[in-house]
Amino acid sequence: MSGVRQITPALWNSVTKWQKFNNLRQFSNSVIERRNELFTEEQKRQRERVGRIEKIEVRYLGLPQDVTLIMNRDLSTPYNCAQHLSEGHCKRSALALIDGNVAWDMHRPLPDNCTLQLLNFTVADPHVVNKAFWRSCSFMLGAALQNAFKEEANLQLHSFPGPNIKSGSFVHDIVLGSRTWEPSKPELRALSAEMIKLAAKDIKFERLEINNELALEMFKDSHYKREQLPSISSQNQGRVVVYRLGTHIDISRGPMIASSRFLGKCTIAAAHKLADEGDKDAIYRVQGVALPSGFVLNHVAYGTLEERAKKLNPARQPNEPFEELSHVSQMA
């Protein structure tokens, strides 16, 4: 038996020492189910609120040719537009660009007339789509950690800093009921495998904007999320943006890539202890590196990326003031 699913028995030895801290919030099935129920109910309510269907003009700019599409206001998404173009557009498009400068989720409804560009990872200027990819990797890492750790570990997802490709790693900060966790290579490989499992399932990222009251209810089990929500909502007119990937829900301003399937080769490279937290816990920064699906690097080049991803990512630490917290985990 192991403290982390598919992870070495060594960690279980330390995890058993954490059991006396079971009064801390845990990601139990009931908590996850309730959070998903609230997400689904609000998502349904917002769709039903649309009412009478109004038409909008979406001017698609790109290959094979520019074309104007007549779509449904607050219902049609960039992905729906891609469906009118070709199957290839649906498969390749990871992110949309609205009116030439607004990054937009592929599955987020369009509210008005606009121009639309569909972005993939081979566009001339990949900066915007690369940031969305890095942000999505951090989000997926949170899901992988939640899937990997058993309740006895007292895992609490804290946040993840904004994406910075130059840093060499995507990040998710967590709190564990141990001050001595040092993941072994098999443990890190197991976390990498969890990421690949998510990619294989081809799960779409779902975006939902909710009010602060619902957000507090949705994350009432999470001390850290509730602590962050006032700052987040106050900077967004009382609104909070959440995303769902499968059953994993977290806060982020986004945008995210269209689906988990865009994750290709991936390595969770390191976990650094940042600070002690409370009487018994500690904050850890889990770091990884990944390539979009279809991208290939030789072993030596990818190994260099892995080594770089092991170095402590210098992004704002979770125990520092939330100066830019317009969305916690502030995924820029």
Image (cartoon, grey):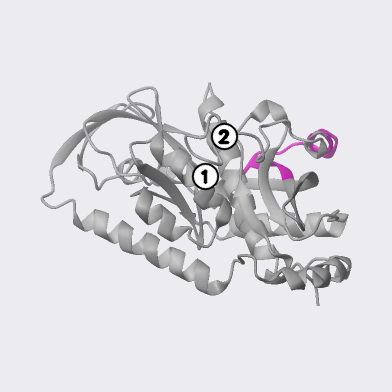
**Residue holding disc 1:** 228
Query: Looking at numbered disc 2 in the image, what kind of residue is underneath it?
Result: Phe
Question: Gap between marks 1 and 2, in whole Å?
Answer: 8 Å
Q: Residue furthest bottom?
A: 1
Q: Is residue 322 above or below residue 35?
A: above
Q: Position of residue 210 (x, y in %)?
A: 35, 49
SS label for mark 2: loop
Q: Is residue 253 visible?
A: no
Report the magenta residues as a range.
Answer: 286-307
Query: Looking at numbered disc 1 in the image, what kind of residue is underneath it?
Result: Gln
Q: Residue at x 31, y 46 (%)?
A: 80
Q: Position of residue 312 (x, y in %)?
A: 79, 36
Q: How many marks?
A: 2
**Left or right, residue 124 beside residue 137:** left
**Residue holding disc 2:** 322
Disc 1 and disc 2 in contact, CB within 8 angstroms: yes
Label 2 crowd bin: few (<14), some (14–19), many (20+), radius 10 Å = some
**Left or right, residue 113 beside residue 199:** left
Quarter where residue 161 is shown? top right
